[in-house]
Image (cartoon, helix red, strand yellow):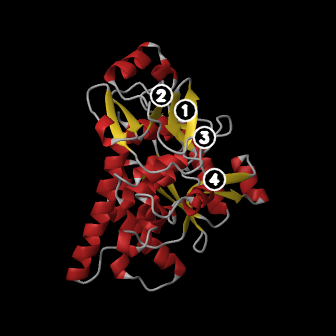
Amino acid sequence: MKGILCDISAMRYHARRGLDAGRHPYAQLARVPADCLHRASDVRRLAQTGTLARLRTPELPLHLLVPTTGQAQSNRFAVCHSCRTELPFGSVQRVAEGLFCLTPAGCFLYAARRLTLLQLIAYGCQICGSFAVDPDGAHELLDHAPVLHASDLRMFLARAPAHLYGIKKARAAAAYVSDGYRSPREVLLGMQLCLPRRLGGRALALEPNRRVSLSPRARRLYGRGYCVCDLFHEETRLDLEIDGAYHRSAEQQARAALRQTALMAMGIAVVRVTGGQTADTTVADAVALLIAARAGRRVDRSSCGQAQEGEEDAFAKRQKRLVTEVLALDRALYQS
């Protein structure tokens, strides 16, 4: 009997970086097996053995793939999702004896069934990000190598059969996925600034976690040869920093001040935003206006919520939808 984690169980598993893609080979499963794990008694037994705790996926009910709608039962131990189509190669990996999980790319494809386009873009940026949720703490963030790169995700989707449910949305979302984000709030602000206007963004070219080599003078000030900027705009030499809980200690604040001094010595402007402010659309508006001013360009009012009344209302709704949908995804993934 085999069980395949899917949906929110698989998404939370990857959010905690429970799967090392380099160590776990792909499972040779072309379809969901007929003898798949789906009964409450089987899930209860799995929980009692400690397998779920070791996988850092202790929450019940467990979301599992089943091959037929007849097995798609739901109770407090298991929520089953029917999947009658083939599983593209690279969709499933073994994580424990008799237990499998959708890979990060497979999870992204399956998530297209239930997530909105904006949520799917955010999820892609998160699984391609350089952070993880600490499963042993109060859901704090840790630095962690990405489990997937955006280029690999797009390659996986390009090779998947075109008739698969959700593939069109998955491919559309993957086009906007970027590597390098280091927190969900960086993803939220990055999407508000970088996505096209039709999706509620400002169509600005900011690069997440850009490594900037320091000049000799700046190096002496900071004590290091480079800085990593949260969101960097190359044309205007603007570094947008999102301050989280890790900036609260006196030592870290002093280090941040030295870093800012070093960047300013190189002509790079530093703008600091708190994690809470990333959900305020007026902050993204202000950043868009600042970039336009530094670039010496005429401000496009339609891209920062300041168009004519009818246009402003439409864009404001897109802005609000983006923030609302991404925050809903974050609550499901990181506040379980």
Residue 114 location, x and y as percent? 34, 51
Q: Report the Cα–Cα distance between label 1 and label 4.
A: 26 Å
Q: Which residue is mark 3?
A: 28
Q: Are marks 4 and 3 in contact (CB under 8 Å)?
A: no
In this view, the mark in front (3 or 1): 3
Q: Are marks 2 and 1 in contact (CB under 8 Å)?
A: yes
The disc, 2 or 1, on the residue closer to the chain's N-terminal end is 1
Q: The disc labelled 4 sits on which kind of residue?
A: Val
What amino acid type is highlighted by mark number 2? Pro
Q: Name the residue nearer the viewer: 216 or 208.
A: 208
Packing grade of label 4 (10 A; few <14, some 14-19, many >=20) is: some
Eye-nearest disc, 2 or 4: 2
Q: Which mark is residue 266?
A: none
Q: CA distance from mark 2 to mark 1?
A: 9 Å
* Residue wearing tag 2: 135
> Would you say residue 255 is visible in this rendering?
yes
207 or 122: nearer the viewer: 122
Which mark is first along the chain, 3 or 4?
3
